[in-house]
Amino acid sequence: MQLTKEKFIRDFKDAVHEAQLIKVPAATPTEAFVSLAKVIRKYYTPLWLERNRKISEDQKKVAYYFSIEFLPGRMLETNLLNLGILDTVKEGLADLGIDFEEVKNAEHDMALGNGGLGRLAAAFMDSLATTGYPGFGNGLRYKYGLFKQRIVDGYQVELPDSWFGSIGNVWETRKDHDIVDVKLFGNVYLQANEEGRIMPVYENAQILRAVPYDVPQIGFGNDNINNLRLWDVEIPEEYELNYPTVADRRRVQDITATLYPDDSSYEGKELRLIQEYFMTSAGLQTIIQSYLKQNRPLENIHEKVSVHINDTHPAVAPAELMRLLVDDYGLEWDKAWQTTVKTMSYTNHTILSEALEKWDAELFKNVLPRVYQIILEIDNRYVAELAQKGVNPETIENTRIVKNDQIHMANLAIIGGHSVNGVAKLHTELLKDDTLHDFFVLFPEKFNNKTNGIVQRRWTQIAAPELSEAIDKTIGTGWRTDIHELRKLNELADNPEILADFYQVKQDAKAKLAAYIKETTGIDVSTDAIFDVQVKRLHAYKRQLLNLLHIIKLYWDLKDNPDLDMVPRVFIFGAKAAPGYHFAKSVIKLINEIANLVNQDASLQGKLKVVFLENYNVSLAELIIPAANVSEQISLASKEASGTSNMKFMMTGAVTLATLDGANIEIKDEVGDDNIVIFGMDKDEVYQHYANHDYYSRGVYESNPTIKRVVDTFVNGTIPNSASEGTEIYEALITHNDEYFLLEDFEAYVAAQAQIDALYRDKEKWSRMSLLNIANSDKFTSDDTITQYAQDIWQLEN
Ligand SMILES: *Cc1c(COP(=O)(O)O)cnc(C)c1O
């Protein structure tokens, strides 16, 4: 959109006067933020109306991305950048004496997600709007986002993240005209109606009101606005007598109160099932209503609607769509089933078996009695059809939805849809060969890969403005709209002046992070050190502990030889542990205690520093990632489905230190073997150990004195204040046979770290590697990923 600075200043002043009854100079950053948001809303509202009008006039097919998590972070700067008015607004505010950074920081992160999965969903929203495809999000409007993490005495403490604060969500619009009801609990029996059709009769069901709040998703540079619809729950007035006490009401409000802070393990809570069903049912109901306005037959809904199931949380969708089509709209089962399968598609995000959702049949039946009947019918028909085709009984049993009194949600999503995708090449291969092999044999045509991506705009233009300017200076500004132009940097990677420029940009980003570290932790770090970063959810498979083992080895090396010639290193961690994940919390405690130990030890001469930054979230990622020299992506091969922070680091010039896991493999393919440091077992070697049952960590520990010394450090009193956590870690590594093969990969990791040290000493060589990483990161733009979804899976037109 077009905007002059003068008009912006007038609009902004008016908004401040109107909203706060004060003059601009008196406005606090929060007041300035609220007024600025009001001005921006005014700017985009006509664009949003026009977009909705156009989509319905053109009767375009729309994809709905169902996800229990969305993790956009802050929206202000993205909205301004995408509208094309970021610079104008910054200049206008500067003229008024207002610091844009302060205003920006007044916005609370929208953290309705745990980590990679939610961040991906948010990236796809941005990219759908940017590529122009009609793709809308569907999720829950949690009152509290992911918990706020504080570190107290080295321990993680969880506080509620009340992100609405005093100002609410300035971007959302409540849509009363799209309210629908959702039914839970009660009894259901079937009865013939007057026309002889068998209909469900509900008794004692709980009826709740689903209220949509729409959040605009603004495309970059195209004035396209899509919609992210988040559902809240309310008690319908006509049923308020059913909720006489505050406690009764609170139980209902709980449905949208909090995001489950559980990153990858299965949470078997009734409330979680209700959350999943609530957003799915409400979403599907409004989708049908909006489709019917086009006066087309429901049995062809797949021609105008795609529903995407992001991980298994919304996997009840095929059954719920069947319920709506058959019960509420009177479609024949077979016709309803055909259109349902063509409408639905599913992304699998993990091969970790504990994260594949299963519901206890009794619990499911109690909460969703009618949907349960429908799932039984889908399951029966599935089994009968395959048996009739002569499929062997074992395959049928492995793939059916209901077995051993459990409902297997991934199976429902696969059977009830036409597409199943993994999120990186290796991950999709593992799904086909292993986790979902029986399905692959039955339905090979359903399987496809869509490697994850990142919104390049957030990680370069917003998080790394100085880097972006350096890129402008070398290849022009075309890359800002066409990320593939970054490849032009490949030809410049031998130019010492350019390399020096980019080196300086990294140094400046490091200085900014160093100041933040000093301010928040009191720790002094030097920008001459290698900034070695591992930021991601804390999980055993991600192996933060392997990083820690190496730090302990360096500690002993330096204690043995204080004059050891090593490039100073700052190890930086950021990670939240799920509140119930004991082991992960113990790793956090140990990182902090080891940080205390090494940071205070003058004999180490500042060569080794360890920093744990609390409350890792998108905004902190924006500060940390551009300042990294080394990107730690060290999960056990086969366990990380894709990873996306690996892509953010690459794009901002860190060198990846990685196992051959997830998208690390594709990063290596893009950047070349010389510009990445790979170590450790690959997926075949890991699987061989599983097949041969031949890994014995105690054997490694007893035969390798270095490893023994490192591991013993956890239990011999070296690290203060962590006896019980140290014992827990020792036992995980030795007594419980080191499930994630840390000791097996340890020596290779140490060697890889030594290689990093050697490479970094050659400043020009390192700068070249760094630049080549930026130059070849374009493959990971989520704009391209979403284009593949839109074309291959959803058949959309932009
Ligand atoms: C990108 C991102 C993640 C995902 O990190 P991985 O290393 O891929 O697991 C998690 N949290 C935040 C805040 C992110 O920005």
Image (cartoon, rainbow, N blue to C red):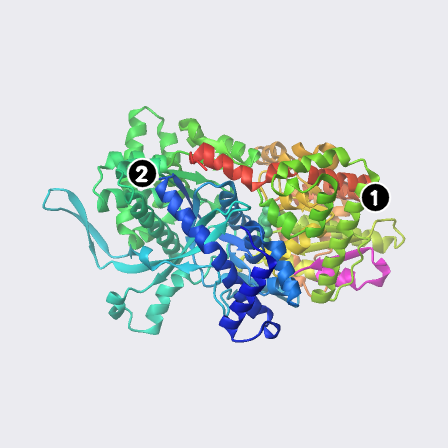
Relative vertical location of residue 45 with respect to residue 325 in this rendering, above or below? below
Q: Residues within 10 Å of mark 1 (few under 14, many from 20)?
A: few
Real-space Cα distance between discs 1 and 2? 59 Å
514 vs 313, left or right, is: right
711 vs 354, left or right, is: right
User: Extreme right residue here?
Assistant: 563
> Can you give x and y, in whole percent of width and height, for residue 450 in the image?
52, 36
User: Extreme top residue here?
Assistant: 390
- Residue ID for mark 1: 763
Q: Residues within 10 Å of mark 2 (few under 14, many from 20)?
A: many
Q: Is 595 a magenta residue?
A: yes
- Mark sitting earlier along the chain (1/2): 2
Relative vertical location of residue 717 with respect to residue 463 in this rendering, above or below? below
Question: Residues in magenta?
Answer: 593-613
Query: Quadrant location of residue 415?
Result: top left
Q: Is residue 125 visible?
A: yes
Q: 770 or 52, which lies in front?
A: 52
> Can you give x and y, in whole percent of width and height, for residue 513 in the image?
72, 58
Of the two numbered discs 1 and 2 in the rendering, the one whose residue sits closer to the viewer? 2
> Can you give x and y, in whole percent of width and height, for residue 678 in the image?
70, 37
Q: SS for tag 2?
A: helix
- Residue ID for mark 2: 301
Q: 355 or 33, which lies in front?
A: 33
User: Residue at position x 30%, y 28% from top?
Assistant: 387
Identified by mark 1, the residue type is Lys
User: Residue at position x 28%, y 64% from top?
Assistant: 236
Q: Is residue 699 visible?
A: no
100 vs 68, left or right, is: right
> Can you give x and y, in whole percent of width and height, for residue 378 in the image?
29, 38
Q: Is 605 a magenta residue?
A: yes
